[in-house]
Amino acid sequence: MFPLYINYPSFIHPQIFPGIPVLGLLRWYGLMYIFAFATAFMILRKEMNEGMLNNENYKATEDDIISFIATGIIFLLIGARIFATMVYDTSGLYRQKPWLIFWPFDTTTHQFTGLAGMSYHGGFIGGLFGMIFWCVRRKQKIFKWIDAMVVAIPAGYTFGRLGNFFNGELYGRITTMPWGVVFPFAEKFSASVEWVQEFAAQIGMDISEMKLVNLPRHPSQLYEAFFEGIVLFIILWLVHNHKKWHGMLASLYTIGYGIIRFFIEYFREPDSDIGYRIAKDANAPIYMNTSLLNFSTGQVLCFLMIIGGIGIGIGTYLYEKKRTKIGA
């Protein structure tokens, strides 16, 4: 039987140049961040050239875009890191020693690790505060600039999820789909367990000489890169020249991302030390989807995003309607 799964490419490592001094510190995930920010800049510049960021008495410049993105990035990284350590870490280490939140070295080996561990939802909140801060300081219309930025975010986000794939992290649940990937760092299962043997037989995996089996999983990072990145970008790009009020695109992005990520979470494995936040069956395994009523942390946060996005849409629409009526 032809194997119905894909082995994770052995030549892919988290480091771009593994084993080489100094250069070995360069990681794909960090490089993907650079690509993401460069992509966001190019899209914002195109929107600027289209006049999307201009006012009656003000014309935006590339310097404005650079400072806007830079401010957003700083707040994004702070929010993403704090959220990851406070919400997703269960050891209590960062609550006891908060100065380690931004410490880029392993506390045991003292090796450079960078800021390992980021949360999208924390980055969303931090980036939002950063954009608001910049707009208030520069006396620019907040949701005009945020609308422009949310069009750029999904395209850049695609690179971030590709970085997760190159790191072999944030993989999905086990699957019999032929595009399932055997990730090297995923949890292994005993080959003596009956369900593991049946699962392996379905995908043509020979486990007769194995004690522990690494089963194929959904490449959920690639699902996210495509749907939360490329598809959501296309939708926003097609709509951005037809928006009816400032805040419409911010609302569409927040709702759209929340809905897409909510459903992809059914394919992505939750953090093993957290499991489900809400579960029909408290003992349900996290490595397979046994019920649509088992909700991960990401799904809870995405549900809040959807509610928040609806609130942004209604609030900005009513404000714009009121402002227009007063102006008339």
Image (cartoon, helix red, strand yellow):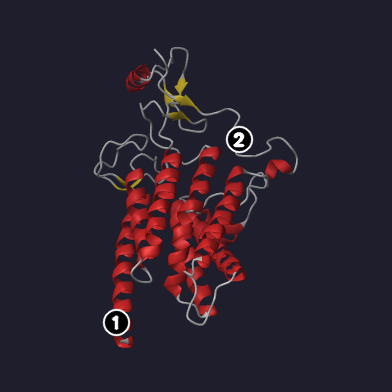
Q: Can residue 96 be seen here?
A: no
Residue visible at 32% across and 82% down? 324
Q: Which mark is residue 13?
A: 2
Badge 1 or badge 2: first in the primary sequence: 2
For the image, the number of numbered tags is 2
Q: Residue at x 58, y 46 (%)?
A: 29
Indicate whether 271 appears above or below 136: above
Residue 121 in view, yes or no: yes
Disc 2 residue type (three-letter)? His
* Nearer the observer, 294 or 98: 294
Q: Does dot 2 land on a helix, a strand or a loop?
A: loop
Residue 98 x, y percent position in the rendering: 56, 61
What's under tag 1, amino acid-wise? Lys
- Per the image, label 1 sits on a secondary structure element best described as helix
x and y, in percent, of residue 7 in the image: 49, 25
The label shown at residue 42 is none
Badge 1: how crowded within 10 Å, few (<14), some, or many (20+)?
A: few
- Residue at horizontal 39%, vertical 46%? 227
**Which x, y percent locates residue 279?**
27, 45
- Residue 205, compared with residue 33, is above or below; it is above
Q: Is 15 placed above or below 133 here?
A: above
Say which quarter of the image contains residue 75: bottom right
Name the image quarter holding the C terminus. bottom left
Q: Is residue 49 left or right of residue 295?
A: right
The front one of 50 and 42 is 50
Q: Position of residue 258 (x, y in %)?
A: 35, 54
Residue marked by disc 1: 322
